């Protein structure tokens, strides 16, 4: 009877070792999924913030064009558009540098 128990114990020990390896692999996968999820949330937040900034600029353009005479509205809107288009390459360059440095 003790021979049967020893064989059962050896089988259980092998099963436990396999379970521990499986659990460790699952924990590693979960940690990777959390990191990917956090990176996705960061990206979504940056896109949302960028969208809000562009809407803010549009709102300020409307506010400023409403504060001047009608004949100057086109000049104000052109200045706002020029300033955004001039800064766009600078912002893209900074973004690309940041992405290359972080990878």
Image: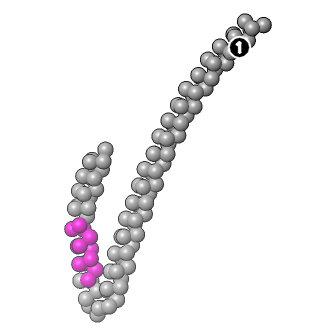
Name of the residue lying farthest toward the right: 1
User: Front-most of 18 and 98?
Assistant: 18
Asked if residue 49 lies in the magenta stretch, the reply is no
Give the crowd class for mark 1: few <14, some 14-19, many >=20 residues within 10 Å.
few
Residue 59 screen position, x and y as percent: 38, 79
Left or right placement of residue 33 versus residue 75 in this view: right
> What stretch of residues is rendered in magenta?
76-87
User: Front-most of 2 and 83?
Assistant: 2
As displayed, is residue 101 above or below residue 66?
Answer: above
Residue drawn at point x = 73 percent, y = 12 percent: 5
* Residue underneath mark 1: 8
Residue 34 screen position, x and y as percent: 49, 45
Residue 43 screen position, x and y as percent: 41, 55
Pick the quarter of the image with the C terminus: top left
User: Front-most of 97 and 17?
Assistant: 17
Residue drawn at point x = 26 percent, y = 61 percent: 91
């Amino acid at each position: 009877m003790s021979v049967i128990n020893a064989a059962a114990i050896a089988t259980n020990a092998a099963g436990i070792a396999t379970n521990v390896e499986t659990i460790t692999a699952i924990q590693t996968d979960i940690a990777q999924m959390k990191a990917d999820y956090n990176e996705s949330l960061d990206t979504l937040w940056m896109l949302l913030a960028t969208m809000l900034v562009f809407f803010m600029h549009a709102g300020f353009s409307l506010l400023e064009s409403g504060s001047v005479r009608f004949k100057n509205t086109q000049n104000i809107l052109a200045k706002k558009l020029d300033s955004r288009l001039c800064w766009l390459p600078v912002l893209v360059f900074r973004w690309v540098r940041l992405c290359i440095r972080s990878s």
